[in-house]
Image (spheres, grey):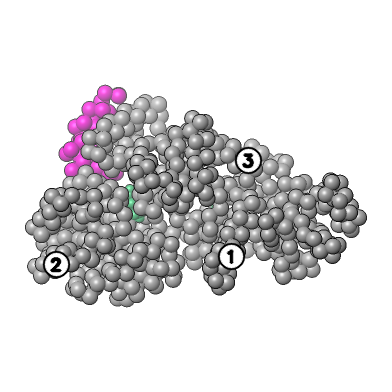
Amino acid sequence: MSPATVEADPAQQVLNAVFGYPAFRGRQRDIVEHVAAGGAALVLMPTGGGKSLCYQVPAILRHRAGQGVTVVVSPLIALMHDQVGALDEVGVPSAFLNSTLDGDETRRVERDLLAGRLVLLYAAPERILTPRFLAMLESLAERGQLALFAIDEAHCVSQWGHDFREEYLGLSALHERFPQVPRMALTATADDHTREDIVSRLRLEQAERFVSSFDRPNIRYTIVEKDEPKRQLLRFLRDEHEGDAGIVYCQSRKKVEDTASWLSAEGIPALPYHAGLDADTRRRHQDRFLREDALVMVATIAFGMGIDKPDVRFVAHLDLPKNIEAYYQETGRAGRDGLPADAWMAYGLADVVNQRRMIDDGEADEDFKRLQRAKLDALLALAEAHDCRRVRLLGYFGECYGDGGEHEDDDAAGAVPRLRCGNCDNCLAPPATWDATEAARKALSCVYRFRQQGGKRFGAGHLIDVLRGKVTEKVAQYGHETLSTFGIGAEVPESQWRSVLRQLIALGHLRTEGEFNTLELTAGAREVLRGEVQLLLRVPAEAPRRGRSTRTRGGADKPPPLPLDEAATARFTALKAWRGEVAREHNVPAYVVFHDAALAEMARERPATLDELAGISGVGSKKLEAYGAEILRVLRQDA
Ligand code: ADP
Ligand code: ZN
C-alpha cells in the first residue's frame, strides 16, 4: 500500500499494520468508521463475524487522536484474559480489571488507566458500576480521555434472553453520567425482542444499527436420525474430525460423564463439563480445551458462552436443543476462524417426546408453554426438513437466504425455484422423499380404533406392531388382531413407521401422554384423516434405498480444511510445535499467537524474507518483529 493511501485510510492502515489482516469483513469497515468518528452503534453480527475488531480498531484510532481509553464491558473473565493476551501479542496496550487481580495488580492497572497509557480496558459490569471506578471514569471524562464504551454480549441486558445478567441493567448509568462519550453495543443474538430490549435499556435509541447477515457459510449443517447415537458419533468423529477440537452437547450431566469417559476409552481425548462439577474442575477443563489442539469437550449447555476459541472444528448434539435460537447459538461456536466446520446432530423420536414432556411438566404458565412448544415445533420442522437447512435457519431469523445461493428448479413442473446452499446435508445429498399421506392416515385411524375399542391408549411400538400385522402377546391380549386397521401397513418397514410417527408428533397431529408415552390424537389429526394435509417425508437413512448408502461425506465433496502437500504439512506441524512453545511461555492459548489459518498459509507460501512474511494474513508489525526471524528459521529448517 502506498503511503498516500495509508494517510487517507487510517482504519485500513491499523487493520494491516496492527492486526496483519488484508481487508475488513462484511460491515466491519462501516462500523469502524462510524464509531471512530464518535457515532453510537448497535452491532448485530453472528458469532465469528469479527465483532472485536469493530471496537478495537476505533479504540486504536481514537487513542491515537488523543481521545483516551476505550472501556469494554464484558461479562466473562476468560474472554477478557484472552482478548488482552491477543492485544498484547499485536502490541496494543490494554488491561483488564476483574476479581482475579490482587490489590497490587489492580492498582497498577488503575495507574496505567489514569495516566492514559491504555488503549483498551476490559472490565465486568459490576466493576464498572462501583463508585471507585465511576470516579476514575469521571476524572478521565473531564480531561476528554474517555474515548468509547463498548458493551460486549449486550443481549445480557435482556431478561428475555437466556444469558440475562442483573448487573447489565445498571449500564444505563453510563449514558446518564457520560452523555458525551460514544457508546456501542455488540451481540450475536438476533431476535427482535432482545434487540429492542438492548436499545431501550442501554439508551441506544439514537444509535445507528448495523445488522449483518447471520449466515455462517463455513459451517456445514447435518442432522441424522438416531440409530445408535454413540456409534454414529464415533463414526462422525473418526471419519471427519480425527485430531480436531470440538464440543459434544448432551442434555444431562450423567450423559455428559458417560459420553466423555466412553470417548476417552475409544481413544478420543475428551473431558466432561457441566454445572455439577466443582468450579476448579470446570476451570481446568475449560483451560485445557482452550489451550490444547485436539480436545473434545462433552458438555451440557453450561459450557460455551464466551468461548471464543476460533478453531473449534465441530459442534455435535447428542440431544435435541430447546429451540432454534439455542441450536444456532451452540452450533455457532464452531469455525469462528472461517475454516470449514461441522454442526452435526443426531435426533430421534425419544428427543421429541422428552422435550415435549419437559415443557408440559415445567413450572411456566400456559402462555409461556405455548410459546416454548411453538419454538420446539420450529426446530422439529428443521430436523425433519428435506430441503436446505440453511435456508430454513436463516428464514427463521427473518433473513432471506439468496444472494450467492444456487437456484435449482423443482422437479415438479412450474414449481417455485428452490434455494440451496450447497453446504448442508440435504443440499449435498438430497434425501429421497416418499408420500406418507396415506400411511399417516392409517396410523391415526389406528390410534382412533384403540380409543374406540376400550378407550385404552398405547405407545408407538404397539401401534407399529398392529399396523404391520404382527401378532404379539399384547396384540392378542387386547384382541387387536380383530381391528380393521390390523396389518393395513405391512408394506411399510418399521423404521419408516417410526419416522411417520415422529413427524406426526413433530407436526402436532399426534401427541404423547403420561409415563408410558402413549399416543393420543390432537385436534390437528382431523386434517390428516380427512386427507387435507399432504405429508412428504424423508426416507429414513437406514431404510435401504439406492444411492444413499454410499454417501461421500468426508470424501471428495468436503473442502479439506488445510490443502497442504506433504512437505507443507511437515512445515505446518513444525510451526505448530513452535507456536505451542511460545503459547506456553506467554501463558496464552495457541491461537492467540497465530491462528491455524496463518500458520497454514506460511507453510504453503514458504516466505523467505520478513517482507514476504508480512504479506501473510494475521502477521502484523508487532508479530513480525517479535516472531519473524524465528518463523523464517523454522521454515528454513523444515525445507
Ligand atoms: P465474534 O466476537 O464476532 O465472534 P471475533 O471478533 O472473535 O468474532 O472474530 C472471529 C475471528 O475472526 C477472530 O479470530 C478474528 O481475529 C478474525 N477476524 C475478524 N475480522 C477479521 C478480518 N477482517 N480479517 C481476518 N480475520 C478476521
Ligand atoms: Zn443447504
Q: Is residue 106 above or below residue 297?
A: below
**Mark 2 against mark 1, which lies toward the viewer?**
2
Residue beneath the point at 20% across and 50% down: 101
Query: Magenta segment range?
Result: 610-639
| Cβ atoms under marks 3 and 2 closer than 8 Å | no
Quadrant of the drawing holding the C terminus? top left
Residue beneath the point at 70% across and 55% down: 516
**Disc 3: which residue:** 228
Mark 3 sits near ligand 2, with its Cβ under 8 Å away: no
Category of crowding for the residue at label 3, using alpha-carbon neighbours closer than 10 angstroms: few (below 14), some (14–19), many (at least 20): few
**Disc 1: which residue:** 373
Residue beneath the point at 16% across and 64% down: 132
Percent x, y for residue 455? 81, 64
Mark 2 sits near ligand 1, with its Cβ under 8 Å away: no
User: Which quarter of the picture shows residue 374?
Assistant: bottom right
**Along the line of sight, which residue is nearer the eye, 246 or 108?**
108
Category of crowding for the residue at label 2, using alpha-carbon neighbours closer than 10 angstroms: few (below 14), some (14–19), many (at least 20): few
**Disc 2: which residue:** 135
**Mark 3 against mark 2, which lies toward the viewer?**
2
Alpha carbon of mark 3 to alpha carbon of mark 2: how far? 60 Å
